[in-house]
Amino acid sequence: MDADLNQLKINRNAKQIDAEIISNKKVGPYHHMVFAVGEIAASARPGNFVALSVGGENSASVLRRAFAIYRATDKGLLGGTIELVVAPHGAGSKWLCSLQIGDFVNLIGPLGTAFGIPTTAANTMLIGGGYGSAPLFALAELLKNRGCRVDMVLGASTASKIYAPLEGKRSVSSLTLTTDDGTAGVHGQITESIPRLIREFNTEVIYSCGPMSMLNSINKIAQDFDLVHQCSVEESMACGIGVCMTCVVPVKVNDDIKMLRTCIDGPVMDGSSIIWDKESLKDRLTK
Amino acid sequence: MDADLNQLKINRNAKQIDAEIISNKKVGPYHHMVFAVGEIAASARPGNFVALSVGGENSASVLRRAFAIYRATDKGLLGGTIELVVAPHGAGSKWLCSLQIGDFVNLIGPLGTAFGIPTTAANTMLIGGGYGSAPLFALAELLKNRGCRVDMVLGASTASKIYAPLEGKRSVSSLTLTTDDGTAGVHGQITESIPRLIREFNTEVIYSCGPMSMLNSINKIAQDFDLVHQCSVEESMACGIGVCMTCVVPVKVNDDIKMLRTCIDGPVMDGSSIIWDKESLKDRLTK
Amino acid sequence: MNSFDFSTKIASKRFENPIFTASGCASSGQELSQFFPLSEIGAIVTKSIMNKPRTGRITPRMAETPSGMLNSIGLQGPGIDLFLERDIPWLVENKAKVVVSIAGESVDEYGVLARRLRAVQGISAIEVNISCPNVENRGQVFACQPDTASAVIETVRRNIGGELPIIAKLSPDVTDIVEIAASVIKAGVDGLALINTLLGMVIDLNTMQPKLGGKTGGLSGPAIRPIAVRAIYQVHQAFPNTPIVGMGGVSNGRDALELVLAGATAISVGTATFSDPTAVIKIRDELKSLLIERGFTDFKSAIGYAHRQSA
Amino acid sequence: MNSFDFSTKIASKRFENPIFTASGCASSGQELSQFFPLSEIGAIVTKSIMNKPRTGRITPRMAETPSGMLNSIGLQGPGIDLFLERDIPWLVENKAKVVVSIAGESVDEYGVLARRLRAVQGISAIEVNISCPNVENRGQVFACQPDTASAVIETVRRNIGGELPIIAKLSPDVTDIVEIAASVIKAGVDGLALINTLLGMVIDLNTMQPKLGGKTGGLSGPAIRPIAVRAIYQVHQAFPNTPIVGMGGVSNGRDALELVLAGATAISVGTATFSDPTAVIKIRDELKSLLIERGFTDFKSAIGYAHRQSA
Ligand SMILES: Cc1cc2nc3c(=O)[nH]c(=O)nc-3n(C[C@H](O)[C@H](O)[C@H](O)COP(=O)(O)OP(=O)(O)OC[C@H]3O[C@@H](n4cnc5c(N)ncnc54)[C@H](O)[C@@H]3O)c2cc1C
Ligand SMILES: Cc1cc2nc3c(=O)[nH]c(=O)nc-3n(C[C@H](O)[C@H](O)[C@H](O)COP(=O)(O)OP(=O)(O)OC[C@H]3O[C@@H](n4cnc5c(N)ncnc54)[C@H](O)[C@@H]3O)c2cc1C
Ligand SMILES: Cc1cc2nc3c(=O)[nH]c(=O)nc-3n(C[C@H](O)[C@H](O)[C@H](O)COP(=O)(O)O)c2cc1C
Ligand SMILES: Cc1cc2nc3c(=O)[nH]c(=O)nc-3n(C[C@H](O)[C@H](O)[C@H](O)COP(=O)(O)O)c2cc1C
Ligand code: FES
Ligand code: FES
């Protein structure tokens, strides 16, 4: 993540294509969808996302929707695929989930920053809320290959909303589940379990993805323990490619505050640099 | 058709239903579509139309589209079907044509006035332009059953655009085709052939359906021959049920001019009462 | 849940529920009665009526636009005589609550209409559509200037007498809608109707000419909803005690709730009726469920709620 | 067909083709250069730049609406110093034609910006965004009154000197856009940009509060196209010799053609870039085909064509 506005930032690898859907399976409350994306797969890194057009030709939805890449598989000359985990929520995501194999969706990717990887083996903890777990499995694989210990903690309001496919678990050293209603794993909010687990696993680096309020809580814990915290944030995005300035989060840069674009300076950002309490900024922002 | 504004006019038989598509076949440049409509079929008369929602849930198209009923088949307790002939033209009709068997479309019908039937057997001529032939086949059947002679004249710019299915022809005494480009039947505009055919068949009543300019020309011929002319007109409709006043045509009522709604006082109207030259009215209309 | 109070009030008049039709989008109700009993909704707001019968504009009178439509009807209508003789008795007979919308080309015409309506039984309110060209002033729309807007309202107020609530229907095509609202409130209205259509145009790419016979038309439908919400919010903020009949692109219960939270005391449904004749009924039912889900025990406490919580 | 002349002119400046980006919808061009060479389009209109760096408004800054969106960015930007040092050289190096959009909170700030730009190489025109709150006058937007609008333009004119064309960007949120156009034309603009966004609001049904951090936001996208066409048509009718950069909901060649026929000399594409980064290229190609299909031999003869044929 680069906070220096003096340096131009472009998604150098981003391509726009019509991607064919080659699988669309309901998994609990989510849809696991696979897209044929050619060379895009090769340049995707854990933490990147794609922006999809939704609603079809005569749709009242004019904006793209962002989805974290769950997995990218490069097949060389055969092209590659990316996989997404989509929660049917509003008009756009429901439309996506209703698509069939063989349908095409306009896709731009890979976009945004990727998770930073420790230069030496470290004890890492990957924390995901709801569909926030999506980008963590590919990250786990990469970290494991680099010799890191990977402890994964996934939480949701209820058991069915935890997205944790079997094949995703093979790279983790431990997997802890938490549910607000106690239907699976530890009963309680995911953040309640984190301090205990950090101590247990001797965690050095935290990666997180999920709702902003969860990331905020995790960030406090990371600061208490003085840990590096890389989080993938989620703000409303209009363009996904850095031209509209809707998706910003306030970030401390030296003594200054900069509103950085989560689509290009993020979504993966250094948790300690983010100003989580937006209200505290009211006076420094434009009215 | 009732021109007296003192009398209230309501589509007494109109029902709103989600109609299932039970067939959708491409026929030349058109789509022949069959909908399961239950009791609506029983109350449909030749000349009536239906209004369909288009574009699905998140569509940017907010208005219904009107389609003339090509055929209505009442199957008693089994419910009934109606058939439409749809020309894929803009967003709405293309969407309709893309639907599959088993899909549902919200439908209101039957709407509007029906063709008036002579009280005694008469020599009738049915003139259709393009998909304007759609409502004429059911009319032909009805007229034949009443003992009328039925001569049908169908025209279009080119052969493929004439909609004249085999089964539709069984009720007609003669069928004349015309094409502007000479690819089928008589070479030339449909209206050029009409005077000759009127003389040949001793026509007493004309029924017509097609573009307004064609109806206008036919009306002049009908007046020259002093024939009754019932035409099905087409104006832009927003509501289809009589509440918006967008779909009007100017009609002579005694010495006055009334703007009558083609969705409820039409689409079938007495050709001689319509003021075809709208421009002539400019001074009498609201600026 | 049965005890949820869905009623609303404009001045002295009570309505069973807050869902009304929008003027010009339900004619005088007869055609809709084929689809539901008119007594099921809060009120029928009739097509704006003028003093004389009127032919309206040349066709085409409508053009579909993205999530909306343009219309240029030109206030076609039967005139007040036939309206009073034919439509009002029918509406009363069918147990509909009636809000009569009136329109004029001069301040005087509004006065004449008000006098004709003052003694009529079965009317719950008068909606004064001031988005009409003023023929005495270069065709400038009354609603566009505070002075002409208030002149119309003063005249109606003077002529209507009694306790029939007067609702002024404002145009969003102004620099400062709060200023116009202030002027008509000062002139004595009991409520406001927000918003009328926005002036728009579509050009036909085949003829390369404006598509509508009248060239420009009024834009309505979901496309304009954010503008309606903003206008209602601004006016409710400035005049929290003035009832607002909110409208503009409401096509489901969620849309209606948005306008209510912004400050609407009742909701008129226009263009949505064209896409679904029973839209008003669905919107009524959905709005009620949404309010109950959110813990409201009556409709009134949701009005303007988006203001009460703000910092 | 190769001989079709697609170029257009604003005052003395010639553009290869009439398709521009819209201010605030293409940043300073760098990000889009990943998708196409910037020299392929008529011009890049940069995000409105202010004198000082600016953080902009609190998030959420956008809300999707039917066929449109609201934004409330609050003119976040690097300030003129960094802009001149970093963005302009990059744009020049990448062979982009550049229209610089400027914004100020006071008449003076516009003057300062104009002086900073007067000697800068590689700029084709200045677009003066006067749809900004005037902090010296209760936050009233400059574009909303003829006198404040013309005060800004006069100051820019005086400070810019030379022959750099000045384009005034107007707001549609006014009672009479022709009156505002008249005032800035009198003050010496070379062209107009029509239309900026319309003020709107969305209320979040979960929080029951305005969805945007800044409460209100600007409505853009296809939803507003009929309003853009109307505004362009009205202003072109009144001032047929003043070039208009038309914008508002253009998302394909047909939309662009509509604005051109209404009177636009060039077309800016805003929101459509968010749904498709290469929208400008597609619009350019589609517009050209549509013009050729209709028998035009050059772009210029299509400008305002809808007026020439009318009765
Ligand atoms: C970086 C990033 C990664 C994401 N990854 C995933 C993922 O892996 N799986 C997944 O299901 N969803 C993901 N989302 C959320 C997704 O982009 C959509 O916002 C969500 O699917 C809702 O869109 P909708 O059209 O169904 O809902 P609507 O409510 O119709 O959306 C309306 C508008 O609000 C915006 N919006 C709604 N909810 C959110 C939200 N929570 N965050 C940001 N904008 C929102 C939408 O983008 C849209 O513009 C991600 C978002 C971002 C920014
Ligand atoms: C009484 C009546 C009967 C009709 N019967 C048939 C039929 O049997 N088969 C058939 O294919 N079409 C028929 N139409 C035309 C049909 O309703 C649609 O207008 C047509 O399909 C184009 O719609 P679209 O969405 O594809 O085009 P778009 O161009 O996207 O339509 C945009 C808008 O313009 C209106 N519009 C466009 N063309 C016309 C037109 N020619 N007349 C009136 N309004 C128009 C549409 O209703 C819509 O509101 C009939 C129309 C009427 C009024
Ligand atoms: C076809 C049509 C006719 C209208 N006629 C009138 C009218 O006569 N008087 C009036 O005050 N408003 C009239 N309106 C405006 C509506 O009452 C309403 O203010 C506007 O359409 C916005 O609401 P909507 O988006 O729900 O349609 C008309 C609107 C339409 C679409
Ligand atoms: C996110 C966003 C930011 C904008 N920023 C500016 C700006 O800085 N200056 C300006 O003059 N207009 C700005 N606009 C307005 C656009 O330039 C344009 O006038 C408007 O969006 C209508 O065009 P569209 O419908 O093609 O987007 C902005 C619009 C959007 C959507
Ligand atoms: S979403 Fe447009 S800048 Fe990030
Ligand atoms: S289409 Fe609405 S009155 Fe005929």
Image (tube, coloured by chain):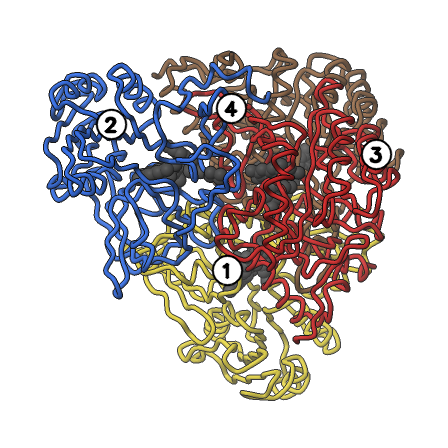
Chain colours: A yellow, B blue, C red, D brown
The residue singled out by tag 4 in the image is C58
| The image quarter in which residue D296 lies | top left
Three-letter amino acid code at the position of disc 1 = Phe
Q: Which mark is residue D134?
A: 3
Three-letter amino acid code at the position of disc 4 = Ile
Left or right of residue C223, residue C149 in this image: right
Q: Is residue C206 visible?
A: yes
Mark 1 C-beta to ligand 1 under 8 Å:
yes
Asked if marks 4 and 1 touch (Cβ < 8 Å), the reply is no
Measure how far apart labels 1 and 3 are at the Cα level. Answer: 40 Å
Q: Is residue A47 visible?
A: no
Task: Mark 2: give few (<14), some (14-19) or many (20+) Cα within 10 Å.
Answer: many
Q: Quadrant of the N terminus of chain C?
A: bottom right
Q: Position of residue B282 (x, y in %)?
A: 52, 16
Judge if badges 2 and 3 mark residues of a common chain: no
Residue sitting at x 49%, y 73%: A140
The residue singled out by tag 1 in the image is A67
Judge if badges 4 and 3 mark residues of a common chain: no
* C127 vs D269, nearest the viewer: C127
Q: Which mark is residue B206?
A: 2
Judge depth for marks 4 and 2 and give the one in front: 2
* As drawn, B163 above or below A238: above
Judge depth for marks 1 and 3 and give the one in front: 3
Measure how far apart labels 4 and 1 are at the Cα level. Answer: 50 Å
